[in-house]
Amino acid sequence: MSAPNPQLLLPSWLATAAENLPDAGLLPEGAVLVEGGTIAAIGPAKDLIGRFPNAERVDLSGHLLMPGLINLHTHAAMSLMRGIADDLPLERWLQERIWPIEGHIVSPDFVFDGTVVAAHEMLLGGVTLFNDMYFFPQASARAVLAMGMRAVVGLPVIELSTPYATGAADCLRKGLECRDMFRGEEALQFALAPHAPYTVSDASFREVVGLSAELGMSISCHIHETAQEVNDSIAQYGMRPLARLEQLGVLNPDLVAVHAVHCDARDIDRLVKYDVNVAHCPHSNLKLGSGIAPIAAMLAAGVRVGIGTDGSASNNRLDLLEELRSGVLLAKGSSQNAAVWPAHQALRSVTIDAAQALGVNRTTGSLEVGKSADMISINFSGASTQPVYDPVSHFVYCSGRDLVADVWIRGQYVVRKRQVVSEAARRTVEEVTVRQALWHNSIGELVKAGQ
Ligand SMILES: [Zn+2]
């Protein structure tokens, strides 16, 4: 079988988010040549049409072409629990609703099906890679592969006994087995995912740090999500969670600190000192009443910030574009400074900055020669986005996920004109849709029974 012809994508606007630039890398009338799933050339359309006259041309007039979006924190499988526990603060949400139901229902089948539902939603919203944290990571990994996406699959670590594992040591053993199982899968990376400072012991954190250094895995951990978490830590350990994690060696450039809502000036100094990345999840923080993270101060101090949706049981949407817009507006409003988090920087936050935070930027996160052709097109030809003066401004302040037209991963269309076109992904979604009714019934029964 011969390789498919190289394709020349011709959008009205191109935003590369290239690594060495300070902004979105906007190139009006730019073009991208894709060959064998990889970006082979980038430049002005006129030049590339001349250099590659035989390439198949893909007309994307009226569209912005840019890197696929990266969801820096989610629990994909929790999509099956969307809407079962609203209007509760984090502690009651977890302890009274989520953990008891998970104790009854979580299994590899639950995780596979829930992750497919989430992946479908995310793909249609322009997400090509997500950083996941959930039980039975091997089932999430299989779902990601079936949907043709990319993921950093978090290997969960929690002291509690769950349907997945008897405790943290069992979690780590099973997690490493899972990582071995998928060795060589180009679409998957694995990360260590200690749940939170209040559910993971000092000894387990030390173990996680050692494995991260030894195996080159990033770490994702919920940190300083609520005021109660910080106060409880002071009562139990005599220090704030970030100070404890500093002592345990957890703070380093491989760490993604998820939430970081309750951070004072010393906490932000720690994030800067150790080059820690932050996954900002504004809607989950708002809905659970946790607070608003001081992102303006973090950005001013030079902290790398990406955006996460968190899971569907606390958001309840996996809409990264909406999350970005809210995050940017909250940062401006809460700091009373309209200059904070400008649009060009915001585009980088959900692409190359997130890729760097996860250590996957050699492969993806920007449109640069040699990287995987993981791209989305956004259609600006409709009434809500006319006229276009600055497509980067439109991306952040004006777009919705319904304007994401096409999604390519490794140069292959996964979504085309807002429809999933990958045969494998379509079949997988159809199968899961049938089973979703069963999950709905059994989870509904647990909710009714007060579990
Ligand atoms: Zn979370």
Image (tube, grey):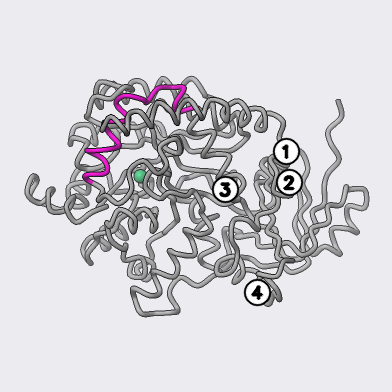
At label 4, counting other C-alpha atoms closer than 10 Å, the crowd grade (few under 14, some 14-19, many 20 or more) is few
Dot placed on the residue nearer the N-terminal end, 4 or 3: 3
- Front position in the image: 228 or 374: 228
The residue singled out by tag 3 in the image is 127
Q: What element carries label 1?
A: loop
Q: Residue 41's spot in the image, x, y percent?
A: 76, 53
From the image, tell me which residue sits under label 2: 416
| Residue 390, disc | 4
Q: Earlier in the sequence, mark 4 or mark 2?
A: 4
Q: Report the residue marked by disc 1.
A: 421
State the image quarter where residue 366 is shown.
Answer: bottom right
Evaluate if marks 2 and 1 touch, with contact meaning CB atoms under 8 Å apart: yes
What residue span does the magenta drawing correspond to?
91-112
The residue positioned 75% from the left and 48% from the top of the image is: 40
Callout in the foreground (2, 3): 2
Residue 270: x, y in percent? 26, 58
Which residue: 13% across, 48% down? 233
Which of labels 4 and 1 is toward the front? 1
